Amino acid sequence: MSEINHGHHNVKSVYAGILLLGLVSLMGDIVYEGSRGLVPDYLKFLGVSAVIVGLVGGLGEFLGYGARLVSGVLVDATHAYWGFILLGYGLIAAIPLIGFTGRWEIALILVLVERLGKAIRSPSRDAVLSMISRGVGAGKAFGIHEFLDQVGAVLGPLLVAFWMLHSGNDYKVSFAFLLIPFLTLTATLIYTYRKIGSQFTIEPTRSKGGKKDRVSELGKPFYTYTFAVTLNTVGLIPVALILYKASVLLQPEHQQWMVPLIYSIIQGVDASAALLSGYIYDRLGVKVLVAPFILSTLPPLFTIVAPNLLTLIVASIFFGVVLGMQESVYRAAVSHFTSISSRGTGYGVFNTAYGLGLLVSGAIYGLLMDLKTPFIITLLFVALTQITATTALLRTPKELN
């Protein structure tokens, strides 16, 4: 079969490949983003405290980001792109099983298995996407992919909310329903592999300098920026605890189906914020990040005091804005502080630090909620982390120039 980036007639097959990979991501997102809207509420139903929910969420994120460093290196060494993609997506099978566990420990393991799957598949899928899109441009390919990804992220929690409402808050039925999009995902993935699996060639690149050189090559501005983002993340309450608080507020009314609905709102806001802030970042640069750093103070404060669902929805909207900026401009800024030769390592280090921030924030905010800490302590913690983070951020560009 001819290489995909040769000749005009193949542009159509390039777009077909991009679209197929996008549909695979869309189906994957329906399953795992659908479950993420329900897991905190399900764990509460199983009798778990806020600190455990915070830790489960944080540990999952840490695994999902930190393990990419290893899987990225492994895929570069083996070139087994499709092996990693198939295994990574295959592990999403853990999600529909969550509803059949009566124990939170097993539910936790299944959540972590899926997050590990994400770490295994992401670097390989992005590599394949960049390879097949050589004829039409990576920006366009990743844009189409991200859009389809986000459609799944909004659709998943909406479908789960519908099933929760339809089944009278039956967790088993709602999680089991996710088996349908998972089987569709598997079929789409196999079809995609058959269609584009052999249509591109891997060109091995020889990197100059060893890994050690690349880590030290990153320099002070990069590490100052990474420290600022990590601290900003530590001070931002994780989404799992916003949803946990929603579950607490909805308990008396037995309206648990609304929990994934709130997550769907967050995903919708996230998609718009990511798109808009990406354009603003291209025009104004790194200083744009001061806005989400300041906005990060609002979700924890609104969530902790939330006396009703409306206050919590306000917290969710602000969280969605920050999340959208984290997913776009926080990552884009890494390229501002790294040279091309050390960019892969830079992203690996940055993702690991970001994941660590999510783990710490889950533990701290979970404790603050469980211990019913006075509001002033939460306020001081939020102020301390975000003021320090913003100060570090403002110092970063100066060091670069």
Image: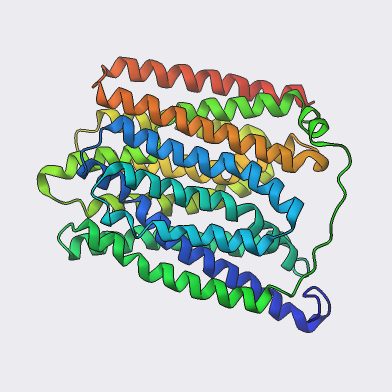
The relative height of residue 183 versus residue 353 in the rendered view (above or below) is below
x and y percent of residue 318 in the render? 40, 39
Residue 396 visible in this rendered orientation of the protein: yes
At which x and y percent is residue 390? 56, 23
Q: Where is residue 279 in the image (x, y as percent from the top left)?
A: 62, 49
Q: Residue at position x 56%, y 42% from top? A: 65
The N terminus appears in which quarter of the rendering?
bottom right
Q: Between 70 and 15, which is closer to the camera in this rendering?
A: 70
- The structure residue drawn at horizontal position 46% and vertical position 32%, both measured from the top left corner, is 359
Residue that lies at the very extreme toward the left in this rendered image: 252
- Residue located at (76% from left, 71% from top): 200
Is residue 284 in view from this perspective?
Answer: no
By what rule are the colours in the image chosen? rainbow
- The part of the image, by quadrant, that contains residue 11 is bottom right
Horizontally, residue 216 falls left or right of residue 372, namely right
Q: Where's the C terminus, which quadrant?
A: top right
Q: Nearer the viewer, residue 65 or 162?
A: 65
- In the displayed structure image, the side of residue 203 where residue 147 appears, left or right: left
Instruction: Report the side of 83 relative to 79 (left or right).
Output: left
- For the point 76% across and 51% down, the residue is 77
Q: Locate residue 380, reporting x and y percent.
A: 39, 15
Q: How many labels does the image show?
A: 0
Q: Is residue 21 above or below residue 393?
A: below
State which quadrant residue 162 falls in: bottom left
Asked whether, in this view, residue 360 is left or right of residue 352, the answer is left
